[in-house]
């Protein structure tokens, strides 16, 4: 299945995942995860998702953080509960992370209940997003949705995700209307930076990975405030910046335009004017940061597809596949 077709399928994939996860959570006791320190782990796009999830947990008063598998190599008990994110459940690093903390309560979120990650966990939630492509679209957003629903269930909160499939349809249409403009402003960039704060840093990380994978343009993610302390100095008319947020990101986007750097601002802020080099995609505001992360990433997915097309790389397969990134399938 093509990358663009999986992006277009997101309302359906998210609705299917919402129904499947809701049914599983109805019969699941998540109380074992209610521990003093909660880690969320993943690799690649799943680590970007972990950053989004941990930020919402922190906002709700939990001591939670995104953790990389390598951080556990010293044998330290860094958390009391661990959530592992992996679309297919075969990422070596994420499986190892759960295996390194057998004393912790462990939840795996994958699309395969028989996967190595599912078997390394105490609890498992199954995604129902259907097929995905590379770069990941439905796998990433379905993972966020399932993790967000699990955390809300743990906290006894109301469902913030039931409306997401309908919002996906709305935002994909809104963002899609800006892609012709962006295709004219942003092809053949020598680099693209992606910027956001808090949970949006995870979204920026996910966006930078999409751009790298789809168009092979060097891209990187930065925290908004950190970005102002040096990293933005290399940006000019030959680069571009994608920003997520409604705070300092607005002024930053306007400043980038002034120095001749094309910028895309994905924001909930009202009344932000576009300019010759500044494109604004206004998205709905939702209180849950994980739900917001799902809404915000759609524009980046569509932009990555545009940049891929412009580079003549539409649905091109990855060039580099190492032999030790996935747990082998038996047989």
Image (spheres, helix red, strand yellow):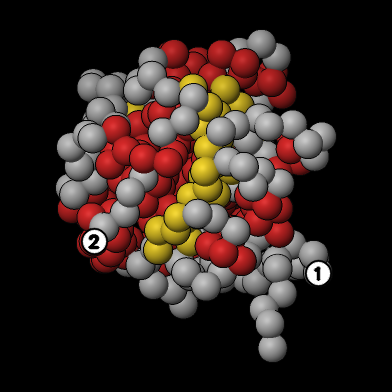
In this image, 190 relative to 81: left or right? Answer: right
Looking at the figure, which quarter contains the C terminus? bottom right
Q: Quadrant of residue 26?
A: bottom left
**26 or 230: which is nearer to us?**
26
The answer to whether residue 104 of the structure is visible from this angle is: yes
Packing grade of label 2 (10 A; few <14, some 14-19, many >=20) is: few
* Disc 1: which residue: 323
* Disc 2: which residue: 23
Q: Residue furthest bottom?
A: 331
Q: Residue drawn at (32%, 38%), measured in percent from left and top?
A: 154
Residue 295 lies, with reference to residue 323, above or below; the image says: above
Circle 1 SS class:
loop
**152 or 7: which is nearer to us?**
152
Circle 2 SS class:
helix
Residue 305 lies, with reference to residue 294, above or below; the image says: below
Residue 187 lies, with reference to residue 24, above or below; the image says: above
Where in the figure is residue 79, as x and y percent of width and height?
60, 31
Where in the figure is residue 98, as x and y percent of width and height?
63, 49
**4 or 295: which is nearer to us?**
295
Residue 296 lies, with reference to residue 22, above or below; the image says: above
Distance from Cα at disc 2 to Cα at disc 1: 36 Å
Q: Residue drawn at (39%, 72%), measured in percent from left and top?
A: 130
In this image, 89 relative to 132: left or right? Answer: right
């Amino acid at each position: 299945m093509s990358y663009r077709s999986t992006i277009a399928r997101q309302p359906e994939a998210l609705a299917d995942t919402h129904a499947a996860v809701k049914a599983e959570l109805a019969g699941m006791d998540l109380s074992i995860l209610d521990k003093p320190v909660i880690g969320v782990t993943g690799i690649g796009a799943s680590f970007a998702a972990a950053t989004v999830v941990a930020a919402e947990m922190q906002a709700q008063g939990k001591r939670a953080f995104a953790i990389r598998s390598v951080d556990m190599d010293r044998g330290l008990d860094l958390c009391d509960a661990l959530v592992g994110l992996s679309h297919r459940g075969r990422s070596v690093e994420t499986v190892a992370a759960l295996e390194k903390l057998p004393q912790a309560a462990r939840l795996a979120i994958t699309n395969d209940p028989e996967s190595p990650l599912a078997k390394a966990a105490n609890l498992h939630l199954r995604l129902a997003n259907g097929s995905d492509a590379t770069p990941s679209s439905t796998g990433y957003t379905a993972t966020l949705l399932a993790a967000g629903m699990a955390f809300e269930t743990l906290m006894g909160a109301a469902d913030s995700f039931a409306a997401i499939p309908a919002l996906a349809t709305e935002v994909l249409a809104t963002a899609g209307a800006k892609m012709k403009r962006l295709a004219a402003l942003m092809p053949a960039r020598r680099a693209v930076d992606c910027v956001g704060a808090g949970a949006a840093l995870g979204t920026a990380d996910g966006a930078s990975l999409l751009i790298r994978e789809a168009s092979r343009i060097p891209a990187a993610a930065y925290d908004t405030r950190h970005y102002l302390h040096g990293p933005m100095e290399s940006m000019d008319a030959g680069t571009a910046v994608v920003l997520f947020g409604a705070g300092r990101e607005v002024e930053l986007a306007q400043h980038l335009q002034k120095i001749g750097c094309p910028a895309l601002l994905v924001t909930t802020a009202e009344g932000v004017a576009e300019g010759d080099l500044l494109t604004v995609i206004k998205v709905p505001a939702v209180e849950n940061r994980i739900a917001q992360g799902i809404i915000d990433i759609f524009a980046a997915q569509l932009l990555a597809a545009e940049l891929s097309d412009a580079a003549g790389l539409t649905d091109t397969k990855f060039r580099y596949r190492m032999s030790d990134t996935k747990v082998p399938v038996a047989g």
